[in-house]
Amino acid sequence: MEYIPHGVCSRLIHVDLDGDTIKSVEFVGGCSGNTQGISHLVKGMNVHDAIARLEGIRCGNKPTSCPDQLSYALKQAIGEA
């Protein structure tokens, strides 16, 4: 599934789940090293655990961040948004 993030540099987040397990995450745009790192860290993680860890992370003075936006994408993917 695809999610359009809000308030961050990335323009799109691709999420692929296998049940409650994150198969892959790909960010389009954003800080390449950080978004690649996030994608690798959450691969194989339980979607609920990832949401709990990423939700609410801020980027500087912004009220959100790429990890926070990923939590919204994951919620949407499992039908909780």
Image (cartoon, rainbow, N blue to C red):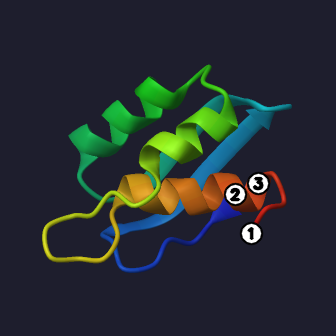
Tell me residue 34's x, y (percent). 26, 42
Tell me residue 62's x, y (percent). 23, 77
Query: Which residue is more in the foreground, 44 or 53?
Result: 53
Marks 2 and 3 sit apart, C-alpha to C-alpha, by 5 Å
Q: Please give the name of the residue rendered at 33% of the width and 63% of the height, measured from the top-left corner.
A: 65
Query: Which residue matches tag 2?
Result: 75
Q: Please give the name of the residue rendered at 86% of the width and 31% of the height, measured from the top-left corner.
A: 19
Tell me residue 20's x, y (percent). 79, 32
Query: Which residue matches tag 3?
Result: 77
Contact flag, marks 1 and 2 (Cβ < 8 Å)? yes
- Residue 32, above or below 60: above
- Residue 52, above or below 37: below
Query: What amino acid is labelled 2 in the image?
Result: Lys
Residue density around tag 3, few if under 14, some if 14–19, many if 20 or more, within 10 Å: some
Query: Which residue matches tag 1?
Result: 81
Q: Please give the name of the residue rendered at 40% of the width and 52% of the height, measured from the top-left corner.
A: 67
Residue density around tag 1, few if under 14, some if 14–19, many if 20 or more, within 10 Å: few
Query: Which residue is more in the foreground, 30 or 41?
Result: 41
Quarter residue 39 falls in:
top left
Query: What amino acid is labelled 1 in the image?
Result: Ala
Query: What amino acid is labelled 3 in the image?
Result: Ala
Horizontally, is 68 left or right of 75 in the view? left
Element on which disc 3 rests: helix
Element on which disc 2 rests: helix
Q: Earlier in the sequence, mark 1 or mark 2?
A: 2
Tell me residue 10's x, y (percent). 38, 64
Residue density around tag 2, few if under 14, some if 14–19, many if 20 or more, within 10 Å: some
Circle nearer the viewer, 2 or 3: 2
